[in-house]
Image (cartoon, grey):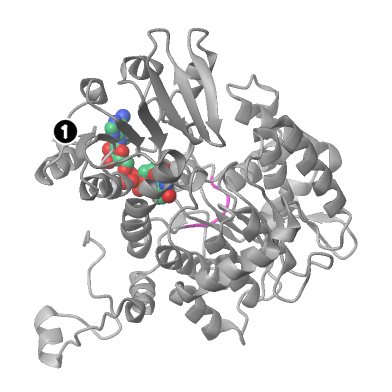
Amino acid sequence: MKKQTKQTKQTKQKQTKQKLPHRVADISLAQLGRKEIQAAEKEMPGLMKIRDQHKKNKPLRNVRISGSLHMTVQTAVLIETLSVLGAKLRWASCNIYSTQDEAAAAVVVGQKGSSKDPRGVSVFAWKGETIREYWSQTLEALSFLDAKGKLEGPELIVDDGGDATLLVHKGYELEQGSSWVKTTSQSEEEKEIKRVLLQRYKEDKGFWTRTMKQLKGVSEETTTGVQRLYQMEKEKKLYIPAVNVNDSVTKSKFDNYYGCKESVVDGIKRATDTMIAGKTAVVCGFGDVGKGCAKAFRSQGARVIVSEVDPICALQAAMEGYSVRPVEKALSEGDIYVTTTGNCDIITLAHMKKMKDQAIVCNMGHFDTEIQVDALDKDPSVVKEPIKAQVDRYVFKDGHAIILLASGRLANLGCATGHSSFVMSMSFSNQVIAQIYLWEKQKKLSPTVYLLPKLLDEEIARLHLEHVHASLTVLSKKQRDYLGLKQNHPFKPDRYRY
Ligand SMILES: NC(=O)c1ccc[n+]([C@@H]2O[C@H](COP(=O)([O-])OP(=O)(O)OC[C@H]3O[C@@H](n4cnc5c(N)ncnc54)[C@H](O)[C@@H]3O)[C@@H](O)[C@H]2O)c1
């Protein structure tokens, strides 16, 4: 493992001397990546139609966009769509395990370049980064150079989980006199964030202030990132406009639900080859992701236990026929555990000590806070036995063992390749429209969290109908009048919940 990191480092150092700055694991994977991207494009009708609609007028012409979002094949189609719309991009992943190295290589090489002469987009991501490398690459993705070689920041950010947004805000606060970087760090992540901020401060004391001035906004992909944004807004610590992409109906009610429904099983199967039928699956959290995961396990023939704190979601789970109880009361039965809460300490060390032998434990929430992996790693009575990349067995004193996937990070992206292209086409169509929205409406927007207008949400759904052989019923004038619907207004009011 150590050796591999060293080798990758050498490759990366060589690569940075090239014309197009980038850091990927292996540029020679580009051909494979290109074939996968071409296949994905056929399943991403929304993104491809948006590309066609805007390729001439280029609404993002020369706009500097930084991305911090899983560097997968589907993200490659997003990046290349933004590029067709005129943007200049730099990209990092938002998770240390989620990069598909062939996709990263193909994006760097681009459609007209070669491994020796890459002409695509600057990507800084590889599968299996360390935390230190991760934060350095996030900083790289935010660091453009102007014509004179001076550092300049992005004008827009595509974020997933809020790490890029966090860096820009913390950097700005540092330059405004905050002493947060000097405080004691609670985690390795926090230490690394402070390290990169101090590094940039040493290089350029005005970088983040300049960046903040030029930044027109961020579009945020996921539930957890959006929660962070609303919190920042409430505390008056959000300094740029933000679009909440997650809560577009065509994102969270599709990606979080249907996406996870397929990719949770993909992750578990690729990691363990375990039979799901006949097993008992414990799903912690019954929001959009939890609903998808529970459905997936049931459809494979597993018994499903759900744990929830919200009475409405708990009742929904019960009405679906799932057993609902706290995780403590499922420990003697569970064979597979999946956390989907976006919260912390959902599966504790004490829980894992009481689990059945060979229980599989994994997380589908954005951050690695849901399972107490740190405590597990630090417990001297527990022996860790790596099985393969992103799959570890932990043996307890009494002889029972659990299998932990992706060190408690997103199992569908760490052990498989995330969601399928079609559902990502919906999420990423929202991202592209949000980027255009932020750019075109920049003068009218304030540092607030916005939702995309419902008409655009409907439009994104419309773009995807044909691909699934769906055709709409058209309202007659009488029916429209009966419902009180005006032309060019959304079908549903904002209060409608789908
Ligand atoms: N793996 C993926 O591909 C993927 C896709 C989309 C979202 N996400 C992430 O998954 C997480 C969940 O997203 P979501 O959209 O389902 O959010 P959500 O808010 O709809 O659902 C989370 C649920 O967890 C419940 N919960 C909170 N604390 C709990 C606890 N202690 N015990 C039991 N339940 C608890 C909440 O009541 C809520 O119903 C987020 O971190 C999100 O960013 C991951």
Tell me where residue 202 sits by quadrant.
top right
- Residue located at (69% from left, 56% from top): 213
What stretch of residues is rendered in magenta?
238-243
Mark 1, residue position? 324
Asked if one can make out residue 347 in the rendered structure from this viewpoint, the answer is: yes
Q: Which quarter of the figure is the N terminus placed in?
A: top right
**Overall secondary structure of the magenta stretch?**
loop
Q: Position of residue 359 (x, y in %)?
A: 34, 27
Ligand 1 resides in the quarter of the picture at: top left
- Asked if 222 appears above or below 405 in the picture, the reply is below
Q: Amino acid at mark 1?
A: Val
Asked if one can make out residue 178 in the rendered structure from this viewpoint, the answer is: no
Q: Is residue 352 left or right of residue 66?
A: left
Count residues near mark 1 (Cα–Cα under 10 Å), then give few for <14, some for 14-19, many for 20+.
many
240 inside magenta stretch: yes
- Asked if 62 appears above or below 277 in the picture, the reply is below
- Residue located at (79% from left, 40% from top): 7
Could you tell me which secondary element the residue under label 1 belongs to? strand
Q: Position of residue 354 (x, y in %)?
A: 31, 15
Q: Position of residue 163 (x, y in %)?
A: 58, 44
375 inside magenta stretch: no
Q: Position of residue 421 (x, y in %)?
A: 45, 65
Q: How many marks?
A: 1
